[in-house]
Amino acid sequence: MKTIRYIFIIAALSCAAGCSDYFELEREPQKPWNSVAEFERAPIGIYWALFTPAFWENPYANWHAVKTAMGDDVDLWDLTQNETGWDRNTANFNPYTNRNVRLLYRAISGCNSALDFVNASNGNPFPEDLPTEDNKLNLDRIVGELHFTRAYAYWLLQTMYGHPYVPGGDNAAIDLPLITTFPTSKPQAMQPPMGTTAQVWNLITKDLE
């Protein structure tokens, strides 16, 4: 038994010595996007997250289904024949409603990650690309699309879970996690700041502007 153990140790040490060059890092980690053309993938990814996934992994479809199910005209349906069994009790959200939180915050996280990337360089992440007017306009458009899609995702969340904005009201109810940057630690991810009705609607308005 000792002989087998010694052979194993020697083999492991020999492998470690022989493979040190093999596992040596040859290329430095790259940034997620290295040009304006590559940065185009950021909003494309958000559009995919919002509109493309099939069936109930699609937050856009989830939102419409839940809004329809909670509408006053739903009693016209023959619900006994509907295997989904829409639940109109908003205190007891069905799985499609709950799933939308994860799906929409996934899209918001993608927007935040890309916007953080731009903000970290004071709005100029690709200095080698931007001397041309075309690249500058494309970067501005991409950043605009990221703000727009984040506003849209928060609008879907707020109109499903939050309170409507009341002009002249205090709009002080705590509605949603208000996440505007990508978390860089576990505590940030687990304990996001909560936004009031006013704060959520103000973010939506600011992003759209």
Image: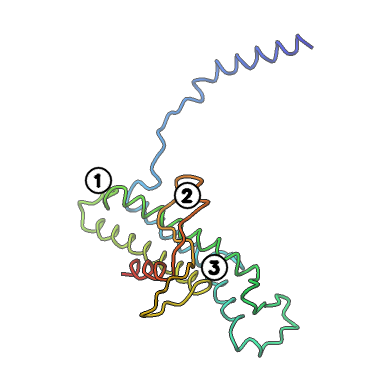
Q: Quadrant of the N terminus?
A: top right
Q: Position of residue 22 (x, y in %)?
A: 51, 23
Q: In which quarter of the image is residue 144?
A: bottom left
Q: Is 197 placed above or below 80 here? A: above
Q: Which of marks 2 and 1 is in front?
A: 2
What residue sits right under mark 3 in the picture? 59
Q: Taking 88 as reference, is 169 left or right? A: left
What residue sits right under mark 1 in the picture? 128
Distance between mark 1 and mark 3 Cα atoms: 37 Å
Q: Where is residue 208 in the image (x, y as percent from the top left)?
A: 34, 69
Q: Taking 129 as reference, is 2 left or right? A: right
| Three-letter amino acid code of the residue under disc 1 | Glu
Q: Where is residue 195 in the image (x, y as percent from the top left)?
A: 44, 64
Residue at (65%, 12%) from the top-left corner? 10
Q: Quadrant of the C terminus?
A: bottom left
Disc with the residue nearer the chain's start (1 vs 3) = 3
Q: Where is residue 77 in the image (x, y as percent from the top left)?
A: 67, 87
Q: Which of marks 1 and 3 is in front?
A: 3
- Residue 143's tag is none
Q: Taking 112 as reference, is 6 left or right? A: right
SS class, disc 3: helix
SS class, disc 1: loop
Residues 131 and 144: in front is 144
Distance between mark 2 and mark 1 Cα atoms: 33 Å
What residue sits right under mark 2 in the picture? 188
